[in-house]
Image (spheres, rainbow, N blue to C red):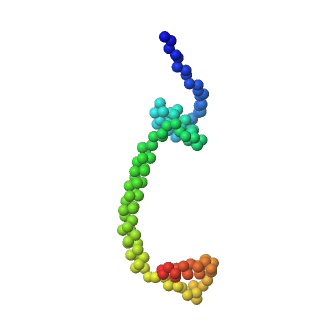
């Protein structure tokens, strides 16, 4: 009974140099990857950059997960504080005196640095809103 020899997969070696003085960030990243995962990681990065589908699911970086967790907690706190903040802001707005139309004799046209038609448009909008 003869054993069939398993055919070796064909491959091409692609390599590049990384310099210790200028590429320290790349070297640190490389060293952080498990030795058995380095080639797969490089293949996935190249496929991702080319817009192709990666062969394996990328494991999320734990730092990214911690950051997402902290951001989610911050958003949750902000959303729970928002009703009270809005209520106090609306009370503050209600307590402010209303803006009265400024007579044109007191504030000459263009005194604010805006074109006359722009200042008139804004003044009209303020009056309509009742501020």
Left/right placement of residue 122 relative to residue 85 reads right
Nearest to the observer: residue 32 or residue 72: 72
- Give the image location of residue 102, x and y in percent: 54, 85
Left/right placement of residue 130 relative to residue 107 reads left
Residue 36 appears anywhere in the view: yes
- Give the image location of residue 99, x and y in percent: 48, 82
Q: How many marks?
A: 0
Left/right placement of residue 93 relative to residue 105 reads left
Nearest to the observer: residue 114 or residue 18: 114
- Give the image location of residue 13, x and y in percent: 59, 28
Question: Does 121 appear above or below 4?
Answer: below
Q: Residue at x 50, y 79 (%)?
A: 129
Q: To which quarter of the image does residue 52 belong? A: top right
Question: Does 89 appear above or below 42?
Answer: below
Q: Residue at x 41, y 74 (%)?
A: 90
Residue 111 appears anywhere in the view: no
Nearest to the observer: residue 29 or residue 8: 8
Nearest to the observer: residue 2 or residue 88: 2
Question: Does 85 appear above or below 41?
Answer: below
- Give the image location of residue 92, x and y in percent: 40, 75
Residue at the far bottom: name it. 105
Q: Residue at x 57, y 39 (%)?
A: 47
Q: Residue at x 38, y 55 (%)?
A: 73
Residue at the far top: name it. 1
């Amino acid at each position: 009974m003869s054993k069939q020899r398993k055919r070796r997969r064909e491959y091409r070696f692609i390599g590049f140099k990384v310099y210790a003085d200028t590429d320290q960030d790349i070297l640190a990243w490389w060293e952080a990857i498990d030795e058995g995962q380095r080639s797969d990681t490089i293949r996935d990065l190249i496929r991702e950059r080319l817009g192709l589908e990666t062969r394996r699911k990328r494991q999320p970086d734990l730092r990214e997960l911690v950051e997402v967790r902290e951001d989610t907690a911050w958003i949750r706190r902000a959303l729970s504080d928002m009703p009270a903040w809005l209520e106090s802001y609306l009370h503050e707005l209600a307590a402010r005196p209303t803006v009265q139309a400024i007579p044109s004799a007191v504030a000459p046209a263009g005194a604010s640095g805006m074109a006359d038609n722009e200042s008139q448009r804004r003044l009209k909008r303020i009056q309509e809103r009742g501020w």
